[in-house]
Image (cartoon, rainbow, N blue to C red):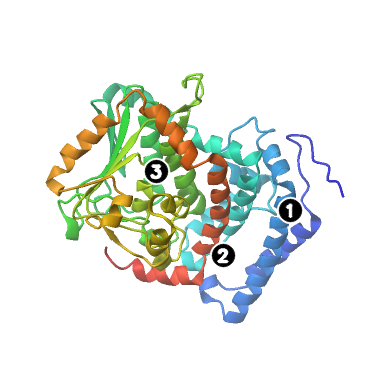
Amino acid sequence: MTTTLPAPGAAVTVWPSLTEAARRADDLVATLPPPGSRSPEQRAAAATAKDAARALRARFLDAHADAVYDHLTDGRTRSLRIAELVEAAATAHPELLPSAERIAAERRLPQADKEGHEIDQGIFLRAVLRSPRAGPHLLDAMLRPTPRALRLLPEFRRTGVLQLEAVRLERRDGVARLTMCRDDCLNAEDNQQVDDMETAVDLALLDPDVTTGLLRGGEMTHPRYRGKRVFSAGINLKNLSSGDISLVDFLLRRELGYLHKIVRGVLADGSAPWHSPHVEKPWVAAVDGFAIGGGCQLLLVFDHVIAASDSYFSLPAAKEGIVPGAANFRLGRFTGPRLSRQIVLEGRRLWATEPDARLVADEVVEPHDMDAAIERSLARLGGEAVLANRRMLNLADEPPDAFRAYMAEFALQQALRLYGEDVIHKVGRFAGRSV
């Protein structure tokens, strides 16, 4: 049977069977106690009703994702970031996605008491990102500078300094020096940290007086590491357990926002040269202490990584129960498949002094030599041909369509993991521990 697609920008009619299945699931859930207080029978009944609606959502979006996306973006003439896109889709098609109000209400609940409405956002975003037409348009939307960065750019260009809650940005000698400064929680990542990091990366890329970027952790006030620099402890498990880590504003924005901008550059209309729509720069990462989880993921997008000899890297994803961002996509390129499985699936920790650690870090130096090694690496990346060659290396190493395909599946699998019973139990235990 031939399907006639609506004209670009035209509204799409959702199947009546999907509307009815969504209504039945909502009606049933409304009669039940909160998820954490349900009996096994009640949990099974809720799961069955939700699964029936989600199966129809996935089938509908497999057939009509392009038409829905075209309607929301006026035939791809408007660039909507993922948060804007899911909110617009929920308004236009409440059968497909939870409303902004429903998501906000769930945000106030512990992870164990949520219904898992973010899974429906994952179903939608997987379908959009899988599309060869809608997916690249969404990726480009996420590569554009944030309104916050554009608002702060004139002042940063004037002063060369910006202090945000989670990141300090300073321009010195042509280098944008980003210092992660969550000193009380070992630079653990949350929604605020992602917002601040994307703002800082945007500013570093947009400022024409910046030639190179540097990321390093600041000195800690945490009792166990007081006065010492630490790179990152990864995702904030306390925030995950309390329900404050979101699929859209943290897990997906992080990957499609500032991490992807470090790889591809920022898409800046009107300021980029005619020969490339992206403004990009080389980046150096300096690891003191440890790069755990999301901190280790960061290293995989940098052009040069320097590690102190007493530091280590780890991706405890299997222990936590979630997917370690795009590390599963990138890590094997650096380490090979066997070592990447040991790190991701078995929780192997790489100490900087191990020979295998040199597959992740370019240099390992004594802690007192870190400053000098950083300045040497920044000088090496200042050559005229660096940008053109890094662009071609990144294109070969990480083709845009391959990245898009990975992120499409990640959108759904990470949403499912967020609400896995094992994750809820594990993060509840880990949240009470220190590193």
Secondary structure beneath label 1: helix
Residue 239, quarter of picture: bottom left
Residue on which disc 3 sits: 301
Q: CA distance from mark 3 to mark 1?
A: 35 Å
Residue 14 lies, in percent from the top left, at 76, 51
Q: Position of residue 28 (x, y in %)?
A: 67, 70
Q: Which residue lies under the disc numbered 2?
A: 115
Looking at this view, is 54 or 30 the one in front? 54
Residue extending furthest toward the left? 368
Give how far across and how far down residue 146 sits, in percent. Answer: 46, 34
Dot 3 crowding, Cα within 10 Å, few <14, some 14–19, many 20+: many
**Would you call the spot at circle 2 few (<14 residues within 10 Å), some (14-19), or many (20 or more)?**
some
Residue type highlighted by circle 3:
Val
Sequence-wise first label, 2 or 1: 1
Badge 2 marks a residue whose secondary structure is: loop
Q: Amino acid at mark 1?
A: Phe
Numbered circle sitting on residue 60: 1
For residue 198, which quarter of the picture? top left
Closer to the camera in the image, 174 or 46:
174
